[in-house]
Image (cartoon, rainbow, N blue to C red):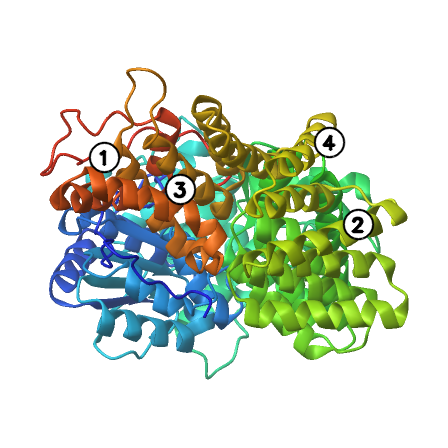
Amino acid sequence: MAGDWRAQPGEPGVWPREPEPGRLPAEVTGFVGRRRELTELARLLAGARLVTVTGPGGVGKSRLALRAAARAAGAFPDGTWLVEVAPVQDPLLLGHAVLEALRLTDGTARPPMDVLTERLAGRRLLLVLDGCEHLVAACAELTEALLRGLPGVRVLATSRAPLRACGEHLHTLAPLPVGPLPVGRVGSDALPDAVRLFADRARAVLPSFEVTAANAEAVGLLCRRLDGIPLAVELAAGRLRALSVEQITARLDDRFRLLTGGSRTALPRHQTLRTTIGWSHELCTAQERLLWARLSVFAGSFDLDAAEYLCAGDGLDAEDVLDLLDELVAKSVVLREESSFGVRFRLLDTLRDYGSHWLRAAGEEQRLLRRHRDWYLGVATWGEVEWFGPRQAETAERTELAHTNLRAALEFCLAEPGEEQIALLLAGTLWFYWVGCGHLGEGRHWLDRALALDREPTEARAKALWVTGYMATLQGDLATARPALEECRRQALDTGDDRALAYAVHRQGCAALIGDEPDRAAELFEEALWHYRTIGELNSNVVMAMFELGVAYLFQGDVESGELWFGQARELCEEHGEQWAYAYVLYAMAYSHWMDGAVRSARALARESVRLNHLFHDLLGIVLAIDLLALLETEPGGPGEPGDLREARVLQGAAHRIWRTVGLPFLGSRSFFGPHQECAERARAGLTEQEYQDCYEAGARLDLDAAVSRALGGGGSADGPEPGPGPCSVPPAPAPSPVRNS
């Protein structure tokens, strides 16, 4: 079945443990106070395997947890890792979010929990699950499963409510102390933490600001009125651009009286938070409040173009959005972020929730959610168009930036009656992202849900069917792929959908190729290419059909026909600036050159295939090329240049690790498995049993970036002075920068 892994003869079945550095974000503002809380958290983490920091929104749970995790890092040799739960809306995607945060991208059909249990076995690490309140049950279930199955894993969670998981230890975080103020001379160390925080944030607005004997009482009063809640203190400090401390305090006094009418049954800290955010809301103009509410439809970061499209109209002119957004940034309502595409923005989760309340109250939520859906359907559609061209790498990165919002748009379509067809269209249109950027597992998740909701034989359903069949094929899951593709083919014939018919036949050819039927595959690819020519289709899929047809001929021993198709595919890629399909063409050409005995050119082609696939984080393309490079290492490079069997075995170990995240090794195909098997046989014949095992295990310890660097470097480092036992111990080498992190 898809996702199965079995060690090949002579290959270890144990996943080697590799220390990781951890992935905690750097602090961008000063951390103030919380000494007692940090000490208590350190004590809890030393004795408990699950610690949850609870408290109201805005009280500083995330900052405290991250600081505590950073201080505890020395106790976790495999790293301290942040998992941002807040952007995840579907409980079924929680496991995928943890895999992504841990850089354990997995494209198999296995449940994420199975992958985590397997991949983290024997490791000692700390997971920080941040913002669990909307997925409490799912987080509790995930945490219990992790802790039961992985003795070396500990979890530090933040949530507005306890997870109520077995073994949970709670730390309830209170607001910062607000008094008393020191008598006499005012020194920073003697100030209450809330006042120190205000002074620190105030200096970011007014560099000369200091708490002095003249203003200490006013600052202390302001902080007391804010109940020491860090979010409120920071918002107040940001207002110093336009008001004095006394003016803020005076206005705050009025706003507190105005906004204390919350539920009598709510906890006091919830009423205080509502008052704090309400005060910030009142400090905004009517148009700023309107923009705030409308921005709450974004699930993650967004750019100015998206904000202008979604938020303009009905009382808000498009040309005013930029200035209003700038004001919201100045008031610390919206965060400003840098990206390779320019400035992006994000609402804090607490403030986003508050804006959503006002959006619903205004009766605008459904309208704005549909506009949000429309925008991100446009992002996906434009990305599909631009995928075939010189801007492929930019398209991959831009789609990655939109990933959280694309999830939100899909979730809206799947939850809203009448939107099922658009869910099919959106999930299918994103095929280039699911397949080309390492998200096979998540793509299957969305498509499976969408296909189950609506069986009407539309163009959108046909597209979703062939995309599902394509991805299942790449995972080696032919039991799912073949029925989906046959349904697509039958529907296309019944409805006269020539485009869907071309894609269905094409992907049936892929299933035949991976199912070790190269002659049948060649017939289907020829038929698909005829359909593509008839309807005038030309894109990355068409190029891939040419590549796959060439491979089908290659597997039948017809090298000449194979190379003819590779040449046509390569010309199209070079003409249009296509890189993703080009990387696969290079892999096939390397395979063909090896069959012809041209080892040097085969190595160069395979390495370039690895490099290009790494740009897109296409794990399947990477691992196919690395496994071919392993075989090429067993070949002499020329007279007096013997092959390097140890380096070949290191690369096989590295490929083995990557296969575990793709699906069934070599897609379950004997043809694709051939180079690996031949390489293993050559290495076993020329190495001692200990060398054979040690080099393989050394390669399996390499992470993705290190494995890519090893392959691109051409080996030769297995005999170097690397630390660690065994002749094949290797340190991770510097890697080229991919479009996205794994």
> Going from the N terminus, do you reach mark 2 or mark 1 first?
2
Secondary structure of the residue carrying numbered label 4: helix
Mark 4–mark 1 distance (CA, rounded to whole Å): 38 Å
Dot 1 alpha-carbon crowd within 10 angstroms: few under 14, some 14 to 19, many 20 or more: many
Dot 2 alpha-carbon crowd within 10 angstroms: few under 14, some 14 to 19, many 20 or more: some
Residue at 56% x, 33% y: name it. Answer: 589
Find residue 627 and name its label: 3
- Asked where in the image residue 721 lies, by quadrant, the reply is top left
Q: Mark 1 points at which residue?
A: 646
> Going from the N terminus, do you reach mark 4 or mark 1 first?
4
Q: Mark 4 points at which residue?
A: 572
Mark 4–mark 2 distance (CA, rounded to whole Å): 42 Å
- Give the amino acid type for the residue marked by disc 1 in the picture: Arg
Q: Name the residue under label 2.
A: 312
Mark 1–mark 3 distance (CA, rounded to whole Å): 14 Å
Front: mark 2 or 3:
3
